[in-house]
Image: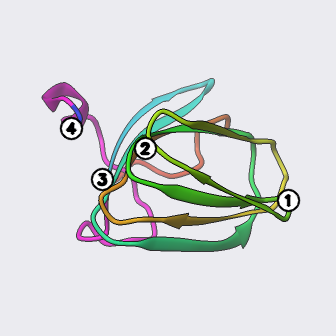
Amino acid sequence: MDFPDFIQTMPALDVPFDDTVVKTNAIRSDAGLVVFFTFFQDVSLPPHAHGPQWGTVVEGEIALTIDGTRTVYGPGQSYDIPGGVEHAVAVKAGTKAIDVFAEADRYPLRN
């Protein structure tokens, strides 16, 4: 299932991956950043930390290692990453997810 057309017209983000790897569409406010991710290839992010993040898997699979505990999330499952807690991410190709970041400037909008 693709995200609706109106979501796909929202601004893209400047993320450290090529458009052939992941597509992003975002809504930003002073309170935070909502990102609609579509992954075309497997993606892994090494351990890192930032402000609070909440997300839900729409389709596919995301494995998160949060504070040393690995959990695999599938469609309809949500995750909550507290601010400052180290976590690593492994996303399967074909995954669609919605992530909400407390940091409005977590990723810059693409020009």
Span of residues in magenta: 4-23
User: Mark 3 or mark 4, which is nearer to you?
Assistant: 4
Residue that numbered label 3 is attached to: 111
Please report whichever mark, 4 or 2, sits nearer to the chain's N-terminal start: 4
> Label 1 to label 4, Cα distance in Å?
33 Å
Q: Residue at 65%, 58% (x, y): give it.
A: 64
Does the residue at mark 1 contact the one at mark 2 (Cβ under 8 Å)? no
Tell which of 99 and 57 is nearer to you. 57
Tag in front: 2 or 3: 2
Q: Nearer the viewer, residue 12 or 58?
A: 58
Name the residue type under label 3. Asn
Check disc 4: other Cα within 10 Å, few if <14, some if 14-19, many if 20+: some
How far is disc 2 from disc 3 in space, using C-alphas? 23 Å
Kindly state the secondary structure of the residue where label 3 is placed.
Answer: loop
Is 44 rendered above or below residue 29?
A: below
Q: Which residue is mark 4?
A: 8
Q: Position of residue 40 (x, y in %)?
A: 27, 65
Question: Residue, x 85% and y 59% (percent of image)?
Answer: 67
Residue 52 location (% of width, % of height): 74, 40
Residue 75 is drawn in which quadrant?
top left
Amino acid carrying label 1: it is Asp
Question: Could you give the CA–CA distance between mark 3 and mark 4, rounded to whole angstroms?
Answer: 16 Å
| Marked residue nearer the N-terminal end (3 or 1) | 1
Give the Cα distance between marks 3 and 1.
34 Å
Left or right side of 90 for 98: left
Q: Main secondary structure of the magenta part?
A: loop
Residue to which mark 2 is pinned:
97
Mark 3 crowd level (few <14, some 14–19, many ≥20, 10 Å Cα):
few
Among all residues in the image, which is located at the extreme left?
Answer: 5
